[in-house]
Image (tube, rainbow, N blue to C red):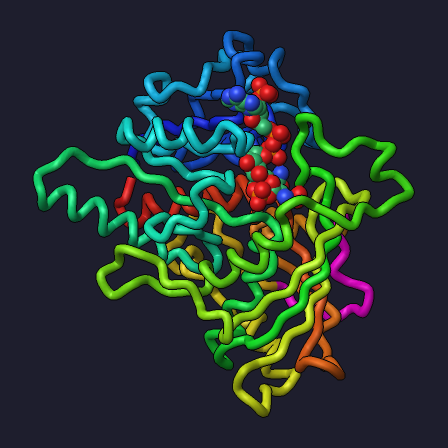
Amino acid sequence: MCAKKIVGVLGATGSVGQRFILLLADHPDFELKVLGASPRSAGKKYVDAVNWKQTELLPEFAKNIIVTECKADAFKDCSVVFSGLDSDYAGSIEKEFKEAGLAVVSNAKNYRREVDVPLVVPIVNPEHLDLVGQKLDAAQKAGANRPGFIVCISNCSTAGLVAPLKPLVDSFGPIELLTATTLQAISGAGFSPGVSGIDVLDNIVPYIGGEEDKMEWETRKILGSLSSDNTTVVNLPDEDMKVSAQCNRVAVSDGHTECISFKFKNQPPPSLEQVKKSMQDYVCVAGKLGCHSAPKQTVHVLEQNDRPQPRLDRNRDNGYGVSVGRVREDPVLDFKMVVLSHNTVIGAAGAGILIAEILLAKNYI
Ligand SMILES: NC(=O)C1=CN([C@@H]2O[C@H](COP(=O)(O)OP(=O)(O)OC[C@H]3O[C@@H](n4cnc5c(N)ncnc54)[C@H](OP(=O)(O)O)[C@@H]3O)[C@@H](O)[C@H]2O)C=CC1
Ligand SMILES: N[C@@H](CC(=O)OP(=O)(O)O)C(=O)O
């Protein structure tokens, strides 16, 4: 059996960072050895630096790791560095890591819109990772050192949205119009400082800065394709995917719910049964590659009329699967349904880990 690859986490004390710690405990391919956070946390044992907020206990292996500052040299033995950094700091830190030849898989928004940076939801568009393969090949052919690279994970609401859309677009062609109204968990707002109790208790906050634009834009990149030479991503044109999002913060701990309606470009549309079957039958590439964290069922189509619900359904396939329910015809567009995804698993840390498993399966790390 091959030795495990050493990996690190930047932003290890945050909402996403804590989820990385949980998901990397006892991982068969990766051994988490290096934890980075702000200068406030650096130099402390992880157990003393972190304000642990997960419902599972802090894994033993992480407790005594000394948190380091986010400097590339401290991570030089890592095959992959996962980033859960605050976006105010991610830009410069991730660039330094990439320039030091490291492979960075990032949750931050900073590089998502670069045409040569893959924006990947691993259960949807892992083929965009071939941008990395192309860069590695080109460097090898030129006799250059192995280059570092950044792979971006999408916005968490966008991840939940595109998972059921992927099989629909593959089966029935473009979705011309889509509206999404989200009900987003408080863990999505991070822990420093996070959403205050007085703001969210007995309340709904109908604004999440930047979120609607991210959902409307990132969807078209993720469902887009690679250029013929695998060097850039070509976004879907506006006429093949026009998204309108309205984003709300609700008093749920984990799990983003999205009420969506959509219309296909090709008319007449498929039947309701065909739509459900296409989502239910979808098998993601990570599953076919045998990746450890790949969901057994990528999209769960629920028939009970009061599901999905965050507390009951967010952990399907350990949070790597997405649930849809209330799939029905829509009197204005073609269909409507409710989508639920775990925002810090398939929307963040879990997505990063599954991306790294795919990079490993493709020999890119
Ligand atoms: N939460 C979610 O569901 C999702 C989050 N994201 C993105 O992931 C990233 C992390 O989000 P989240 O975990 O929610 O945020 P948190 O606020 O919970 O955590 C931020 C992390 O950044 C670290 N940090 C802050 N300042 C610095 C600094 N100067 N140098 C180095 N590290 C620093 C913090 O360390 P310290 O504790 O020492 O201050 C902490 O570990 C963000 O970019 C976010 O947009 C993406 C998708 C989903
Ligand atoms: N904004 C998301 C989480 C997040 O940080 O997303 P992004 O990485 O796109 O900024 C939420 O509040 O649930």
* Residue at screen point 16% across, 47% down: 138
Horizontal side, residue 338 vs residue 45: left or right: right
Decide whether residue 335 is among the magenta residues. Answer: no
* Region in magenta: 300-311
- Quarter of the image for the N terminus: give it: top left
* Residue at screen point 44% across, 68% down: 236
Horizontal side, residue 295 vs residue 290: left or right: right
Residue 4 visible in the shown view? no
Q: In the rendered view, would you say 272 is above or below 117? A: below
Horizontal side, residue 358 vs residue 332: left or right: left
Within the image, what quadrant is residue 321 found in? bottom right
Which x, y percent locates residue 122?
Answer: 46, 53
Which x, y percent locates residue 249?
Answer: 76, 46
- Quarter of the image for the C terminus: give it: top left
Q: Nearer the viewer, residue 4 or 355?
A: 355
Residue 164 visible in the shown view? yes
